[in-house]
Image (spheres, helix red, strand yellow):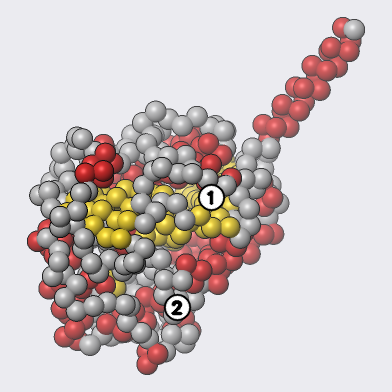
C-alpha cells in the first residue's frame, strides 16, 4: 500500500513538474499610433492590413477597444505600469514614465519574477527604453533610425517629400522584428514573454515607395466629416480639437489627401512587419502554447472634427485595434463588441498565465470575454487626456466630461462619427460613477516631447 502511495506521489510530482514547464508563452505586440483603420474593423475601406487581419482571424478581435490615455508616453506608462493617470500622475507626454513606475512594478517584471524568459525590442515604453531590471534582454536600438536616415518628423505629412531609395531595413521596426524572430525560434526550458514594439505608423509618415502603390493619391477619399462639426462642442472641446493647428495648415496646403495616403502606406509597412513576425511565429516550436496580444497605444484623427493626431477624447483618437489569441481560451475568427480599454491587458495576461495580479494594478481581467465574447459585461472603456478630462465609452455611447465640467454625449447607434452632441438637457448623471473621485495633481512638463 505504501509503495502504491509513493508511486502515486511521484507521478503527481512529475505531472506537476510538466505542468510548470507547460505554462503559456506570451508574444506581446505593440504598435504605435495605429488607429482603427485596419481592414477587418471596416472603419476605412481604403486600409489594407492583410497580416493584422490574419492575426485577428486566429483569435478574438475587440471591435470596441480604446486606449486609457491618448498619448504615447502616458498610454504605455498606464498599460505597462498598471496605474491609470489619475493614480500615477503620468498624464501627458513629457511626464517622464520612469518617474511614475518603480522597478518591479511593470508587466514584464511579473513574468520575469515568475521564471519566464523576458525579452523585448523597440517601442514598448516611450523612447524605446526599458528598465533593465524588468527584462533579461532588450534590443539596443543605437544607430537604428525610427524613420529612416535623413527623414524628418513632418516629411510625408506637412511636407511633400518622398524617399525613393528608402528600404524596409532602414527603419528600426525591421530590426525589432528580426530580434524577436530570432528569439521565437529558440527552444527553452522556461516559457517566454517576448515583446515586439513597432514604432510605425508614428510620424514621420514615410515608408518605402512600394507601400504607396496600393494607395494612389487620386483615389484617396477623405474620412467622413461634416461642416460645422465643432459648433455644438463646449469651448473645452474646441480647444482640444485645435482646428487652427494642423487642420488649418492642411486646408491651406491642399495636402489632406496626401497625408492620408502617407498614413495608409505607413500602416501597410507596419502590417508587413506584423506579417514577418507571424510567419516566424507559425514556424516556432512553441506556437501551440502561446498567447498573443496585439494593441496600439491610441488612435489617430486625420481631419475628423478638424482634429489631427491623438491628444483628444473622441472615437478616432481613443479607438484601437486589440487582438487576443489564447490557446484553449479564444476561438479562431471571433469578435467581441464589449467596451474594453488598455488597462485590461496587464491583469488579463497575468490571469491567463496564472500569475498573481499585483495589488497596484487596476483594470479588468477580460478573460471571461476571451472565453465567451457574448458574456455579459458591465464595465465601460475609460480614456483620460490631462487631469480632469475623461471619456466613458459604453457599448453604444460616448460621454465626455472636461475639467471645467462641460460635457458631450454621443449615441453610437445613430451617430458613429459623433457629429451630434446630445449633452444639452440630457440626464448624464449615470456616467459620474465611472469617473474618479480624486485625481492626483499633474506635474509641470519637464521637457517638451510630442512623440
Ligand atoms: Ca503613440
Q: Position of residue 124 (x, y in %)?
A: 41, 52
Q: Position of residue 46 (x, y in %)?
A: 44, 80
> In the image, is residue 397 above or below residue 442?
below
Label 1 to label 2, Cα distance in Å? 26 Å
* Picture residue at 37% right of the left edge, 86% below the top: 220
> In the image, is residue 233 above or below residue 98?
below
* Picture residue at 28% right of the left edge, 41% below the top: 434
> Do the numbered discs 1 and 2 sit on residues whose CB atoms are within 8 Å?
no
Q: Which residue is mark 1?
A: 374
Q: Quadrant of the C terminus?
A: bottom left
Q: Position of residue 100 (x, y in %)?
A: 27, 39
Query: Which label's residue is closer to the chain start, 1 or 2?
Result: 2
Q: Residue furthest top?
A: 2
> In the image, is residue 145 above or below residue 439?
below
Residue 439 appearing in the image: yes
Q: Which residue is mark 2?
A: 45
The label shown at residue 189 is none
Depth check: give the residue in front, 396 or 222: 396
Q: Position of residue 50 (x, y in %)?
A: 55, 72
Residue 33 appearing in the image: no
Q: Secondary structure beneath disc 2?
A: loop
* Picture residue at 41% right of the left edge, 42% below the top: 378
Amino acid at each position: 500500500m505504501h509503495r502504491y502511495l509513493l508511486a502515486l506521489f511521484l507521478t503527481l510530482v512529475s505531472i506537476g513538474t510538466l505542468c510548470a514547464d507547460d505554462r503559456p508563452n506570451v508574444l506581446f505586440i505593440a504598435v504605435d499610433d495605429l488607429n482603427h483603420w485596419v481592414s477587418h474593423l471596416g472603419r476605412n475601406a481604403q486600409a489594407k492590413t492583410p497580416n493584422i487581419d490574419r492575426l485577428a482571424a486566429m483569435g478574438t478581435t475587440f471591435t470596441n477597444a480604446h486606449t486609457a490615455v491618448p498619448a504615447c508616453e502616458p498610454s504605455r506608462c498606464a498599460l505597462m505600469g498598471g496605474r491609470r493617470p489619475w493614480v500615477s500622475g503620468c498624464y501627458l507626454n513629457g511626464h517622464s514614465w520612469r518617474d511614475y513606475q518603480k522597478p518591479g512594478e511593470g508587466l514584464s517584471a511579473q513574468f520575469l519574477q515568475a521564471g519566464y524568459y523576458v525579452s523585448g525590442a523597440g517601442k514598448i515604453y516611450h523612447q524605446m527604453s526599458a528598465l533593465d531590471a524588468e527584462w533579461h534582454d532588450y534590443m539596443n536600438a543605437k544607430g537604428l533610425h525610427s524613420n529612416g536616415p535623413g527623414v524628418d518628423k513632418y516629411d510625408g505629412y506637412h511636407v511633400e517629400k518622398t524617399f525613393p531609395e528608402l528600404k524596409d531595413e532602414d527603419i528600426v521596426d525591421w530590426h525589432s522584428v528580426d530580434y524577436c524572430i530570432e528569439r521565437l525560434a529558440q527552444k527553452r526550458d522556461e516559457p517566454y514573454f517576448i515583446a515586439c514594439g513597432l514604432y510605425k505608423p508614428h510620424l514621420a509618415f514615410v515608408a518605402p515607395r512600394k507601400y504607396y502603390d496600393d494607395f494612389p493619391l487620386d483615389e484617396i477619399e477623405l474620412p467622413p466629416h461634416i461642416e460645422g462639426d465643432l459648433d455644438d462642442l463646449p469651448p473645452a472641446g474646441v480647444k482640444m480639437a485645435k482646428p487652427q493647428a494642423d487642420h488649418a495648415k492642411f486646408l491651406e496646403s491642399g495636402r489632406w489627401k496626401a497625408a492620408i495616403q502617407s498614413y495608409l502606406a505607413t500602416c501597410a509597412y507596419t502590417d508587413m512587419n506584423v506579417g514577418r513576425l507571424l510567419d516566424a511565429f507559425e514556424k516556432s516550436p512553441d506556437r501551440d502554447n502561446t498567447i498573443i496580444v496585439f494593441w496600439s497605444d491610441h488612435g489617430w484623427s486625420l481631419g475628423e472634427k478638424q482634429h489631427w493626431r491623438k491628444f483628444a477624447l473622441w472615437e478616432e483618437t481613443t479607438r484601437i485595434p486589440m487582438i487576443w489569441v489564447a490557446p484553449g481560451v479564444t476561438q479562431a475568427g471571433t469578435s467581441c463588441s464589449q467596451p474594453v480599454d488598455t488597462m485590461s491587458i496587464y491583469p488579463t495576461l497575468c490571469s491567463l498565465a496564472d500569475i498573481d495580479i499585483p495589488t497596484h494594478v487596476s483594470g479588468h481581467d477580460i478573460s471571461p470575454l476571451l472565453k465567451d465574447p457574448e458574456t455579459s459585461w458591465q464595465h465601460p472603456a475609460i480614456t483620460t487626456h490631462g487631469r480632469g478630462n475623461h471619456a466613458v465609452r459604453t457599448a453604444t455611447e460616448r460621454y465626455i466630461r472636461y475639467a471645467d465640467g462641460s460635457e458631450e454625449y454621443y449615441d453610437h447607434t445613430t451617430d458613429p462619427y459623433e457629429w451630434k452632441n446630445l449633452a444639452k438637457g440630457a440626464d448624464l448623471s449615470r456616467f459620474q460613477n465611472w469617473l474618479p473621485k480624486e485625481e492626483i495633481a499633474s506635474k509641470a512638463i519637464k521637457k517638451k516631447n510630442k512623440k
